[in-house]
Amino acid sequence: DCVLLRQLMSKGTEKDFVYAKVPLQGQQQIAAQLLTLFENEANPKLQKKIGDVIAKLAEYVCDKDDQRGSLQPGTNGWPALLPVVFRLANTATAKSSESCESALTLLKDCVSTLKDDITNAQVELGAIMQNGLASPNVRHKVAVFFLICEIVTETDKKTYAPLLGTVGALVGVLTQLAQAKDEESLSSCIQCFIDVATVEPDFFKAQLQANMEPATFMATVARSKEVADTGLRSQALEWLVSYLEKKTKWITKTIPKFTGLTLEACMSVMLEVEDSEQDLKEWMERMDDEEGEEDADELFHSGEECIDRVAEAVQMENLGASLFQLIGHFSSQEAWQAKHAALAAVKQTVEYVEEQSHVDQMAQLLMAHMEHPHPRVRFTALHGLGQLANDQSPHFQENSHATVVPVLARKMDDP
C-alpha cells in the first residue's frame, strides 16, 4: 500500500499524479495525516515506508521553482514538516530509538528538496547531529553519518563548512562498524564517503592534514584479509584512488605520503589471487575467455585498475621512487603471488615511464621471470613484455630485440 501511495504522491505525468487533482483543503489534510501516521507508527519498516512517501510528496509541495503544489503560500510549501522531523530525529526528544532512526533517514531524504531550510536551522540541526553521534545506538550514528554526507554533497562549501569538524567523528563511526564486523553498514558508509570525495573532496582536507584520516582507515580495510566482503576492500581502495585523482596537486605538495599509502594498498589487493590446483586449472581454462578472466580474481583486477589510475593521475616524476621501491620489494619475495603482483604493476604503469633507464630495468625484471615455475607468473611476464613493447616503441625494440626475440620463440611452446 505504501508503494502505491508513494506513486500517487510522485510528480509525473498529469494522468498518474493523483495528488495534484485533490483540492487544496484535501491536500492539506493528506499532508497532516501523513505526518501523524509517521509519528505514531510503531513498526520501523512501515514507518520508513511512510517516510518515503513524505519525502516524495515534499519534492512537489516544497518546489521553490514551481509553487503550485504549496500547502501554504509564502512558506517553504510545507511549514509543518521540518518541526516534526527535527523533533523526532533528535535522540533527546524522539519517541523511540527506532523512530529516531526513521526520522533521521527522512531528514536526509529531504535535504535535496529543503537544503536551505534544513541548514539554516543550525540550532536544531546541530543538536540532532551532536546527540546522534553521541548515541549508544550505532544505528543513530550511521543515520547521522548519511545525513552529514548528504548535506555536504548537496550544498556549497560555505554552507557545509560548520560540518568540517565532524570528519573525525565520522571516521570513528567507520571504525566502530569495522570492529563490530557490520560490513553491510560499513559498505554503505564508505560509499557515502566516495560520493563526498567525488563531489566535495575539500571536506576531508583538514582531517587528512591532521592525522591522515580517513586515508589510513581506508588503506587498512583494503589490506585486511579479515574482511569477508571483497567488494568492501575494493570500495576502500576506490576512496583512496578517487580522492587522489581529485586532489592530486594538493596531495603531492601537502601530504605526499598519501600516494605511497595508496600504492601499498593497490599492491596488497593484487596479492589476492587463488592458489589451489583447481583454481589454477580453472584459470588456464579461462585464458581464451576474456570476459571470464575479468570475472575472476576481483580484488586483483581492482588493484590493477587502481594502480593504473594512480600512475596516470600522479605521473612518474612524483610516483616513480615509491612505485619502483614497491615493485622491487614484491618481486624479491618468495611467494609467487608477490612476484605476480610486481609484474602486473609493471604491466599497468610502463606506459607512463619516460626515463629509458627505468624502461630497461622494467624489461629486465619481466625477462627474469620468463622461466618462473608458476604459469601465472610466466603469463604476466609475457603480457607485461607485450605491453612494454607497445607503449615504449621503438626504444624497446631497438635496444632489446636481440635478447627478447629468442626468449619469445622458446615461449611459443610454453604449456
Image (cartoon, helix red, strand yellow):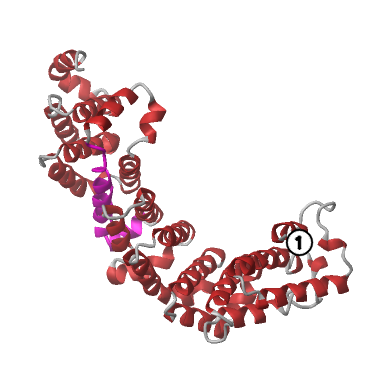
Main SS class of the magenta portion in the image: helix
Confirm whether residue 252 shows in the render: no
The magenta-colored residue range is: 248-275
Relative depth, front residue between 135 and 209: 135
Q: Quadrant of the C terminus?
A: top left
Residue placed under numbered mark 1 in the picture: 9
- Image location (x, y in percent) of residue 344: 25, 36
- Quarter of the image for residue 212 reads bottom left
For the N terminus, the image quarter is bottom right
- Above or below — where is 259 with respect to 113? above
* Residue 25 rendering spot, x and y as whole percentages: 87, 74
Image quadrant assignment for residue 302: top left
Q: Residue at x 76, y 78 (%)?
A: 75
Q: Is residue 200 left or right of residue 216?
A: right
Three-letter amino acid code at the position of disc 1: Met
Q: Say left or right for 9 vs 332.
A: right
* Residue under the image location 61 percent in, 76 percent down: 118
Secondary structure beneath dot 1 equals helix
Considering only vertical position in the picture, is 90 above or below 390? Answer: below
For label 1, count other residues whose C-alpha is less than 10 Å away and answer few (under 14), some (14-19) or many (20+).
many
